[in-house]
Amino acid sequence: MKKTFVLDTNVILHNPDSLLSFADNTVILPIEVLEELDRFKRNHDENGRNARIAIRLLDGLRRHGKPGEGFSLKNGGLLKIVTNVDYKAMSEQFGLSKDLVDNKILFTAYIMKERGERVIFVSKDINARIKGDALGLRCVDFEKQKVDFDKLYSGWKTVEMDKEGIDRFYKNKECKVEDDEFFPNEFAFMLDKETKKHTALGRYKKEFGIVMPLIHTRQNIMSIRPRNKEQAMAFELLLNDDIHLVTLIGQAGTGKTLMAIAAGLQKVIKDKTYTRLLVSRPVMPLGRDIGFLPGTKEEKLENWMGPIFDNLEYIFTGDKSDKTMKGKVKGLIDKYIRDEFIELEAITFMRGRSIANQFIIIDEAQNLTPHEVKTIISRAGTGTKMILTGDPFQIDNPYLDSSSNGLTYCAERMKGQEMFGHVTLTKSERSALASLAAELL
């Protein structure tokens, strides 16, 4: 028996292709969803773009049927727009306001269920799903672009072996492994199974079928050195020009952004491998576009890029507290920005660009949808390296969680690709207080 999926507006704003993602079943759009899409289409953000895509898709379907009767889809399904629901009667029955759009969408789903259809209400809004449960509806999240966060690819694994095996690895500079044991660029933390003290660290090279020692473990990168094995893995990926996409996931203080910026500066200013270090992050904390702030684009961005400036200042000064030195560093950072070695950009302005020969860092990428991450990565031109960093436990986007955000989705989907590398960092190195807060709070 076919199912009937009633879609909330936020599902379409999250991914407009959701309209075509339910196989040969029936997809119901309450007329209120169209009104909300009409309201969002004027926005200049990702929601506005997705609303416009969905509206154009619906317009294209009109040639295959009438809205009230349903549009025939290529996958054998049917898409209907439902009108004329008696919201007043439903409101009196359940005690919910008939003036709220969310309630009207739920009422439509309930009516379809009362007609004997196998209704499933699909929403990214947790509260809407809870209210739907209270009405007796089967309610689900949109699962197409979700991953199992508890089983998320970590980028490395512990391999217990005897002491002689580790000694051979150090002597021969390689360790032969089976093809199905590791993903390309996955790391192996080799551990003496008896003493638990003798260790080695290597990276899997798929083209040779071997695990080989790290190259950059002892290198000082713009005054920054790895403090633990996870940071050593991250630097190995960041400094390898054959790896074009890197994702770094970890809690606050694990050094994700600091290492990415340090590696970017090394590659741009010292090695001259790339022409520019471009740093961007979503404008999420207050839910506003940078246009609400006074000043020029650069002045607006400075307010949002505070964490980036903090990391730049730390890289150039280290732990020195000399105010004169910090003043010189501020001037040096400003000079690099004026000379276009460093560029700070809002995610909003990256759409439509083709960015070649640059080292790009997307910070706080956990606040991006999978579709936004795809859009950003597709901006990479020839010779560009892309770094995505973030903490899936600190998400400001109300419709994303640790399993559905673009950062974790990218890390899981890209594993197995030779130009991709990932590390999940677990140890905080910012300070003893930061480590304690990350562990207990």
Image (spheres, rainbow, N blue to C red):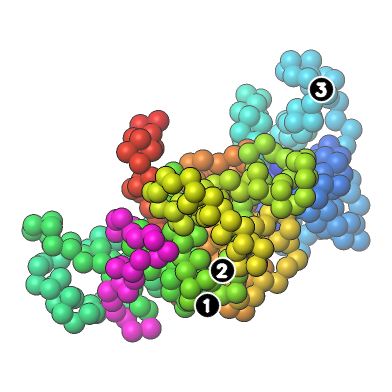
Q: Magenta span covers which residues?
A: 207-230
Above-or-below relation of 76 to 291: below
Q: CA distance from mark 1 to mark 3?
A: 60 Å
Magenta includes 216?
A: yes
Q: Which residue is mark 1?
A: 273
Q: CA distance from mark 2 to mark 3?
A: 52 Å
Q: Which residue is mark 3?
A: 98
Which quadrant, please, contains the C terminus? top left
Mark 2 belongs to which amino acid? Phe
Q: Please state the horizontal and vertical placement of residue 246, each as a whole percent of the image.
A: 48, 65
Q: CA distance from mark 2 to mark 1?
A: 9 Å
Q: Which residue is mark 2?
A: 359
Mark 3 belongs to which amino acid? Lys
**Circle 1 SS class:** loop
Tell me: 325 left or right of 55: left
Mark 1 belongs to which amino acid? Thr
In which quadrant of the rendered view does residue 335 lie?
bottom right
Residue located at (48% from left, 45% from top): 323
Tell me: 437 left or right of 339: left
Q: In the rendering, which numbered label is found on residue 139?
A: none
Residue depth check, mark 2 versus mark 3: number of the one nearer the observer: 2
Q: Residues within 10 Å of mark 3 (few under 14, many from 20)?
A: some
Q: Please state the horizontal and vertical placement of residue 36, each as a whole percent of the image.
A: 82, 40
Q: Residues within 10 Å of mark 1 (few under 14, many from 20)?
A: some
**Circle 3 SS class:** loop
